[in-house]
Image (spheres, rainbow, N blue to C red):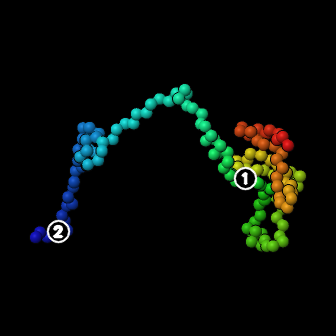
Amino acid sequence: MAKATKNAEPEVKTPPTPSPTPGAAAQDAGQKPVQAAQFPEATEGQVKPSSGQFDLILDMDVSIAVMLGQTQIPIRRLLQLGPGAVVPLDKPVEAPVDLYLQGSKFAEGDVVVAEDRLGIRIRQVMGADGAESKAKV
């Protein structure tokens, strides 16, 4: 049995030389060789409109957020808030509220009371480019 000495140099292992073909190393390791993917070209004539699949999307529910306004207050004041406290917002009462879908503003409206609930009457809807278009009420 050989004893290890403190001054013994560590054994240096040299990495294996690369194989001449890309798949040969994978075959040596027992793996399948990697090949480049080949996909056919798509042309417009191959695309067909779906039949009724769009209806599935149209029936999905989405969440809409309404922003009445906003404000900034010191943390000290925030910690002092309790029942009955009033936090004034930056918008006047007659200003429209903003409606958001997935974090993007898509419309503006007025707060109304519908039966015994709050509601929003759409004032205008934003276009895809951010331009406003008047809603037909």
Whole-percent x, y for residue 76 in the image: 75, 70
Q: Number of labelled discs?
A: 2
> Residue visible at 55% across and 31% down?
47
Quarter of the view holding residue 22? top left
128 relative to 120 in the view: left or right? left
100 relative to 44 in the view: left or right? right
Residue picked out by circle 1: 64
Instruction: Say few, some or many: other residues with alpha carbon within 10 Å of mark 1 (under 14 / 14 to 19 / 20 or more).
Output: some
4 relative to 126 in the view: left or right? left
Q: Quick one: SS at disc 2?
A: loop
* Residue 103 shows up from this direction: no
The amino acid beneath tag 1 is Ile
Q: Is residue 121 above or below residue 39?
A: below
**Front: mark 1 or 2:** 1
135 relative to 16 in the view: left or right? right
Where the C terminus falls, by quadrant?
top right
The amino acid beneath tag 2 is Thr
Whole-percent x, y for residue 54 in the image: 63, 41
Residue picked out by circle 2: 5
Nearer the N terminus, badge 1 or badge 2? 2
Q: Nearer the viewer, residue 78 or 116?
A: 116
> Residue visible at 82% across and 64% down?
87
> Residue visible at 53% across and 29% down?
46
* Residue 132 shows up from this direction: yes
